[in-house]
């Protein structure tokens, strides 16, 4: 999965409250392809409601979020002078501390036996370290962030009774010479949050690695190999009996590119991969695929590019040998990238590739008409193994949008809204559609000075309960906080 650092739809406002690498791993904005580029197998790079909801516990309190770096030629402020003492050559450190008050009625329907309170004060310190340096022909970019969220009332519904830790780490390597290009992106995240699909607070760990090695044969021919591995684990926090779960997705490919003209390129690609699911130590879905496709990339203008693919694949799954999704099948995809200006970009994807059971769709729009105005929209349909029930596959359809605007010189506002509906996929057919899930978030941020920010937020949503049955009712979380950054 390609990674791009981008603003999260639920990012807290005020200087320094930008999104972190977690968003990049699970819900990061779209990765736009160069005119002569090709997308990875079954690429889905849009923000989803589930991931946004999961991460929303930290976004408002600056936990594991980096302070925005000073722009080039920007006048140094007091905070910038302080931060200069935290820089040691290519290594930099930044920190923050947030404190405030929070209200929530979530989790009432999940564990009715727990004696809970609806409000609590909290403390949230955070630390960020990043390292960037060119070493010979290698370019290295590493980042690590950690944050702690502590509720003073251990009986608060949003607390697991202990200090909640959130961590993210990213490492990017790039090597380029006359003929060889090597790219590697590694990411890892861990944290605790509410997961809609499991209907409870969950400890979550995610690790991903994507690499590409390319060799330029001639001016018009290139060959290479690529691969990716994604690991996700979920474990119960509330002790209500939900099984721990692990999901692994992997893929690898070899390819040959031909640059036919300055606007057209062809790729012959052979790839294979698979998915595995384990619930509570019990092996669930295990499926593999192999496919051979021809990809054509056509960029009629510098602002518009199309990538289409067509080929044949073989898919095998352990528990549905009679499914029309096993055996030989046709695989295809079409990706359209449109960037009419530096302020506007759009990516549309549709296809069935890799281990997908049903056609997948994604549309990502980013509009940045002015310096302090941001509009983001993602619409998606995705399939994948569930993180709850053994042998279940989940179809997710949703839309997520956000609008952020600087209202005055020191006052920012934002609104985010999302909708998602899930259903079970059985032998390639959709069954057991659940009631849709809604999400709404409002935020107001005031930049008091260069290193002090005030934030108020309120969000409301409907969620399913722990048994997976919808109708658990509206749940709301609201907070007021003050953040210090350096």
Image (tube, grey):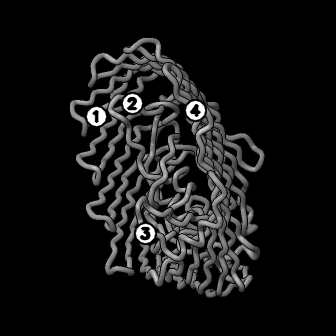
Quarter containing the C terminus: bottom right
> Label 3 to label 1, Cα distance in Å?
39 Å
Q: Nearer the viewer, mark 3 or mark 2?
A: 3
Dot 2 or dot 1, earlier in sequence: 2
Q: Residue at x 50, y 41 (%)?
A: 2
Q: Is residue 250 above or below residue 145?
A: above
Say left or right for 286 vs 325.
right
Dot 2 or dot 4, earlier in sequence: 2
> Label 2 to label 1, Cα distance in Å?
9 Å
Residue 85 image offset from top left, x and y in percent: 64, 67
Q: Which residue is mark 2?
A: 37
Q: Which residue is mark 4?
A: 211
Dot 3 or dot 1, earlier in sequence: 3
Q: Which mark is residue 252?
A: none
Residue 377 image offset from top left, x and y in percent: 35, 57
Instruction: Assign a secondary structure to mark 3.
Output: loop
Labels 2 and 1 touching (C-beta < 8 A): yes
Q: Residue at x 43, y 63 (%)?
A: 9
Say left or right for 82 vs 305.
right
Dot 3 or dot 4, earlier in sequence: 3
Q: Which residue is mark 3?
A: 75
> Label 3 to label 2, Cα distance in Å?
38 Å
Instruction: Assign a secondary structure to mark 2.
Output: loop
> Label 4 to label 1, Cα distance in Å?
23 Å
Q: Residue at x 41, y 76 (%)?
A: 442
Residue 350 image offset from top left, x and y in percent: 35, 38
Q: Is residue 163 above or below residue 469?
A: below
Residue 113 in sight here: yes
Residue 168 in sight here: no
> Label 2 to label 4, Cα distance in Å?
15 Å
Q: Which mark is residue 305?
A: 1
Instruction: Assign a secondary structure to mark 1.
Output: strand
């Amino acid at each position: 999965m390609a990674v791009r650092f981008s603003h999260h739809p639920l990012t807290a406002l005020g200087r320094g409250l930008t999104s972190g690498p977690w968003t990049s791993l699970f819900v990061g904005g779209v990765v736009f392809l160069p005119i002569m580029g090709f997308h990875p197998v079954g690429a889905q790079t849009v923000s989803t409601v589930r991931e946004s909801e999961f991460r929303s516990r930290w976004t408002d309190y600056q936990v594991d979020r980096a302070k925005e770096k000073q722009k080039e030629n920007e006048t140094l402020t007091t905070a910038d002078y302080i931060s200069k003492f935290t820089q040691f050559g290519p290594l930099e450190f930044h920190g923050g501390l947030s404190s405030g008050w929070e209200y929530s009625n979530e989790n009432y329907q999940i564990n009715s036996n727990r004696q809970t309170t609806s409000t609590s004060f909290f403390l949230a310190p955070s630390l960020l370290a990043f390292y960037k340096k060119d070493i010979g022909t290698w370019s290295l970019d590493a980042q690590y962030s950690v944050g702690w969220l502590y509720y003073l009332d251990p009986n608060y519904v949003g607390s697991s009774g202990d200090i909640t830790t959130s961590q993210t780490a990213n490492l990017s390597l790039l090597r380029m010479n006359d003929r060889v290009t090597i790219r590697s992106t590694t990411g890892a995240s861990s944290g605790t949050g509410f997961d809609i699909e499991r209907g409870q607070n969950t400890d979550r760990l995610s690790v991903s690695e994507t690499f590409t090695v390319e060799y330029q044969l001639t001016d018009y021919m290139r060959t290479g190999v690529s691969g990716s591995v994604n690991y996700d684990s979920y474990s119960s926090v509330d002790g209500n009996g939900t099984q721990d779960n692990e999901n692994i997705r992997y893929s690898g490919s070899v390819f040959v590119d031909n640059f036919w003209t300055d606007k057209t390129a062809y790729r012959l690609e052979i790839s294979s991969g698979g998915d595995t699911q384990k619930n509570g130590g019990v092996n669930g879905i295990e499926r593999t695929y192999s496919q051979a496709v021809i990809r054509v990339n056509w960029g009629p203008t510098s602002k518009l590019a199309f990538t289409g693919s067509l080929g044949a694949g073989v898919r095998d799954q352990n528990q549905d040998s009679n499914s029309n999704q096993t055996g030989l099948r046709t695989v295809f995809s079409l990706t359209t990238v449109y960037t009419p200006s530096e302020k506007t970009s759009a990516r549309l994807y549709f296809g069935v590739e890799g281990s997908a059971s049903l056609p997948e769709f994604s549309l990502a729009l980013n509009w940045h008409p002015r310096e302090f105005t941001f509009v983001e929209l993602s619409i998606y349909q995705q399939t994948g193994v569930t993180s709850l029930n053994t042998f279940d596959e989940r179809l997710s359809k949703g839309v997520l949008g956000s609008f952020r605007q600087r209202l005055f010189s020191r006052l920012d506002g934002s609104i985010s809204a999302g909708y998602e509906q899930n259903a079970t996929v059985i032998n390639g057919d959709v069954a057991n559609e659940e009631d849709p899930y809604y999400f709404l978030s409002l935020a107001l941020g005031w930049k008091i000075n260069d290193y002090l920010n005030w934030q108020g937020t309120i969000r409301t949503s409907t969620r399913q309960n722990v048994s997976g049955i919808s109708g658990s009712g509206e749940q709301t979380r609201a907070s007021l906080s003050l953040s210090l950054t350096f």
